[in-house]
Amino acid sequence: MMKNIDSISHVTGKSVYLDDIPVQKGTLYGAVFTSPVAHGKITYIDYTKAEELPGIERIFSYRDIPGRNQIGGIIEDETLFAESEVHYQGQPVLFVVAISENIARKALKLIDIRVEEYEAITDPREAKEKGLLLIPPRTFKIGNIADTWSRCEYIFEGKVDSGGQEHLYIETQGSYAYPVDNGSLRVHSSTQGATLVQKMIARVLNVPMHRIEIDVARLGGGFGGKEDQATPFACMVSLASYILQKPVKMALSRHDDMRMTGKRHPYSSDFKIGLSKDLKILAYKTTMYQNGGAASDLSPAIMERTLFHSTNAYFIPNTEVTVYSCKTNLPPNTAFRGFGAPQGMFVIESAIAKAACQLNISPRLIQEKNFLAEKDEFQYGQIAENVNIGKCYTLARESFDMVSLENEIQEFNTKNNYFKKGISIMPLCFGISFTKTPMNQARALVHIYQDGSIGVSTGAIEMGQAVNTKMIQVAAHVFSVDAEKIKIESTNTSRVANTSPTAASSGADLNGNALRIACTSLLGRLKETASKMLNCIPSEIEIIDDEVYKNKQKVGIRWEKLVETAFLDRVCLTENGHYATPVIHFDKTREKGHPFAYHVYGTAIISVTLDCIRGTYQVDDVKIVHDFGNSMNTIIDHGQVEGAVVQGIGWVTMEELAYDTSGKLLSNSLSAYKVPDIYSAPKNIEIKALETEGPELALLKSKAVGEPPFNYGIGAFFALQKAIKAFNPKYKIDFDAPLTPEKVLMRLYQK
Ligand code: MTE
Ligand code: HPA
Ligand code: MOS
């Protein structure tokens, strides 16, 4: 199995990130002056003192923008710099440029601002009450819930809250821009969306996109946080660089990154679930309030994925789901691994947990009665095909002995007074494709150099998920040459244009298929050259392990010789591949269609031990059956599952964002915001692959893996909840994630 091509350079510190790019002589450094209040009107601002500080080059405001002061992608509702009103603490107002980062930051303290404060709203339900919505609400429905409630034997209702989540990519947001010939700019940006950054810089500067070249070597993590939110910082350095005609760089401090940038959307939801006597879910209704923050950013698309995944891996014949995207005075919330799906799945799993608790049965009995089956219709109209949830669940139950695990835990709980264990099952169904159909396209540019070495450029951005390794695997596979021959270039908008962000778990699928197409076409040309050399027809030629074969016989021509001959024969050794996912479509006017190329399935079993004196806990075991399709790289794919699971557990257990009433983030550093470390990660993670052929629409039949397993982590919430209940039967189960040790303790002793 091919190792991550970056593994050695990462551990030896040689991999180049934005801050490692050697800077040009005369490079200037930027710092952002931001709104001190969450909502208000700027009545006075004076930065003359700051401008006089030695070493300050210039201070930029919205007045200095030659183009438009507008960086909203889906909805144009976000300024680069505040003009008169401010809408969240940390909103950029000015950009200070100095000869050093220190001086730029010092100058921030000399800026005098007065803001007439308005009421700040941080709660999405309150925003909805006041009519503060980012976009109109949307509803997905199937069947007819109104007619169904009367047929239900059991009906349960409840409220569910899930918190935000800080991305905590190791590399903070940053960008470096410098002028090149003819009034153009080259911009290095730590972004998942090179083209989006290019487009917004062009908009802000009022220049055509061809003047702006974006180059990305790799990111120190993105997790969705750099799908949209790398843009403002790239725009700021570009504005300064363009106007001053000098190189300008900035990178946020961790503290600034945490307080200024958006996070996972908190949601608050109401549900109503109706079941038959034999535990079939007949009807499900939920209304969700998405905390969007002060501007739309990606909220409309995230809302959409919540709607798509609101019934997780279940078929519920009568479903009605509504999401309100609420405008609050927090930094605009944004993409985060799962992209709204985890928030939706948490609600349906809560509804099932509530029903099970009231009926005094294991939730498993409800879950397994309601799994999606072949040809079932999703609430968005797509017909389910190659459904693997049943297979994953059955394999998990059998190979991990689910029922014995449950019994062992029960026995442990009867024998122990102050430690209790809990176990839960988390099934998974996650759709692959950008929910916005036009985004499902990609291109790849391949050069075969005359010495036989190969250079590959795609639109995919490497952020630790090892997409570059997968790209090399694709080229090596199609050509059947040694991977050492292939070099993957930086992601650059002048080589590969009009890229979709590397997101929606589809970076490998989209770019890899474009690459496969380019390589296949080059291979065809090389086979033609070989057939001329060997006096045969191209279909008799094969290349296997760097050697030419004719009718399955080695002919003594190596790859290098073949390439050289083709070059001398003036064959084009460069190709551009284009891929657009077939089949998919979606009609927003009816909220029906076939938005996903395929779905990823799986089942996780999570068990925890709770210290009932202290409220502290540990996750003991995570056992997963995951549907990888035909995994093209089991090391990388297992790494993705492990990382995602731990991130998911962090979201529902320990990662708590706290704001004060003025909208100020209190958990703005790593001493106040806790993410899982090696000690709080599960003691054991076991991953078993479901053996399947894999879908045609996945790259080499290897299913996308980046986001789906995040959702397994949700199971930790319900496992903990059961452990609490085992200690305190009076605990009235509720759904308020994250379930931090403090919250656990309150519930252990609830009367
Ligand atoms: N893995 C690492 N190490 N770092 C990351 O930033 N981002 C995740 C996932 N895995 C991420 C990661 C997210 S949010 C997505 S959408 C996918 O990777 C994107 O990459 P892919 O489309 O190539 O899977
Ligand atoms: N997933 C991730 N990012 C996106 C999507 C999506 O479905 N749509 C737009 N950006
Ligand atoms: Mo991932 S949230 O789609 O970048």
Image (cartoon, rainbow, N blue to C red):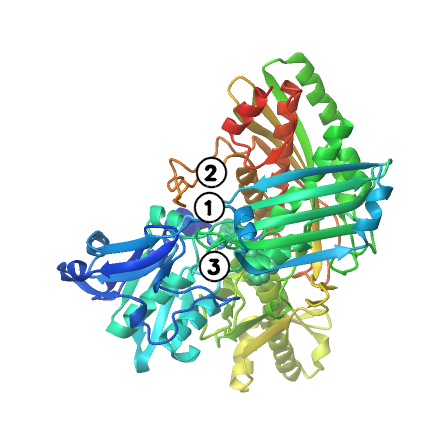
Q: Is residue 527 above or below residue 679?
A: below
**Image point 27% across, 54% down: which residue?**
114
Ligand 1: does it lie within 8 Å of the C-beta at label 2?
Answer: no
Of marks 2 and 3, which one's residue comes earlier in the chain? 3
Residue 20 showing in the rendered view:
no
* Left or right, residue 551 beside residue 572: right
**Image point 74% across, 29% down: which residue?**
358
Residue 253 coordinates in the image, percent (x, y): 32, 49
Type of residue at label 2? Val
What quarter of the picture does the C terminus occupy? top right
Residue 720 coordinates in the image, percent (x, y): 61, 29
Label 2, label 3: how far apart the Cα atoms are: 26 Å
Name the quadrant where ligand 3 sits. bottom right
Q: Is residue 104 above or below residue 626?
A: below
Q: Which residue is mark 2?
A: 675
Type of residue at label 3? Ala
Is disc 2 in contact with disc 3, using a CB cutoff of under 8 Å? no
Instruction: State which mark lies toward you, 2 or 3.
Output: 3
Of marks 1 and 2, which one's residue comes earlier in the chain? 1
Q: Which residue is mark 3?
A: 295
Is disc 1 in contact with disc 2, using a CB cutoff of under 8 Å? yes
Ligand 2: does it lie within 8 Å of the C-beta at label 3?
Answer: no
Label 1, label 2: how far apart the Cα atoms are: 9 Å
Residue 380 coordinates in the image, percent (x, y): 73, 59
Instruction: State which mark lies toward you, 1 or 2.
Output: 1
**Image point 68% across, 51% down: which residue?**
309
Any mark on residue 166, and which? Answer: 1
Residue 182 coordinates in the image, percent (x, y): 31, 82
